[in-house]
Amino acid sequence: MVIIEVSLLSGFILASRSRMLLEHRTIIKKIEVEANVVYLYLEKLNDESQTFILQLEQVIQMKNLKTAIIRIYDYYQPGGLQISSYSGAGR
């Protein structure tokens, strides 16, 4: 099982429409949303490219947003962690 862990930018939440769209993707087995993190559970990944779009809603105006982290790892072997980041600069 592969987990994609997306830390949300400060002042943002996952849009409900985005969650509904993600739930219809057959590759996604489960979605968990905690205070400021979204977890996407995938049964497995292969060599085929996958794109996941998470739409966020800003609920609190924040200045000087820091980058947020995306972690991708195997549930059973978390040591092979892949880390990336994103920011709100493109808004």
Image (tube, rainbow, N blue to C red):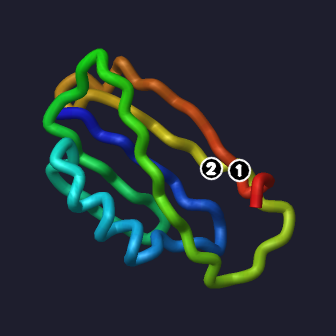
Label drawn at residue 34: none
**Residue 11 shown left or right of residue 31 in the figure:** right
| Amino acid found under the numbered disc labelled 2 | Ala
- In this view, 31 is above or below 59: above
Sequence order check, earlier mark of 1 and 2: 2
Q: Position of residue 28 (x, y in %)?
A: 21, 48
Q: Residue drawn at (51%, 54%), measured in percent from left and top?
A: 7
Q: Secondary structure at mark 2?
A: strand
Name the residue nearer the viewer: 25 or 72: 25
Rendered residue at 59%/72% (across/down): 12
Could you tell me which residue is drawn at 21 percent across and 40 percent down?
Answer: 42
Q: Nearer the viewer, residue 7 or 87?
A: 87
Circle 1/circle 2 CB separation < 8 Å: yes
**Label 2 environment density (alpha carbons within 10 Å; few <14, some 14–19, many ≥20):** some
What is the three-letter code of the residue carrying label 1?
Ser
- Report crowding for label 1: few under 14, some 14 to 19, many 20 or more residues within 10 A (C-alpha): few
Disc 1 vs disc 2: which is toward the camera? 1
SS at mark 1? Answer: loop
**Residue 54 versus residue 33: which sits nearer the camera?**
54
Residue found at x 65% / y 45%: 86
Q: How many marks?
A: 2
| Horizontal side, residue 51 vs residue 69: left or right | left
Quarter containing the N terminus: top left
Residue 79 locus on image (x, y percent)? 34, 20
The residue beneath circle 1 is: 87
50 up-or-down from 77: above or below? below
Q: Which mark is residue 68?
A: 2
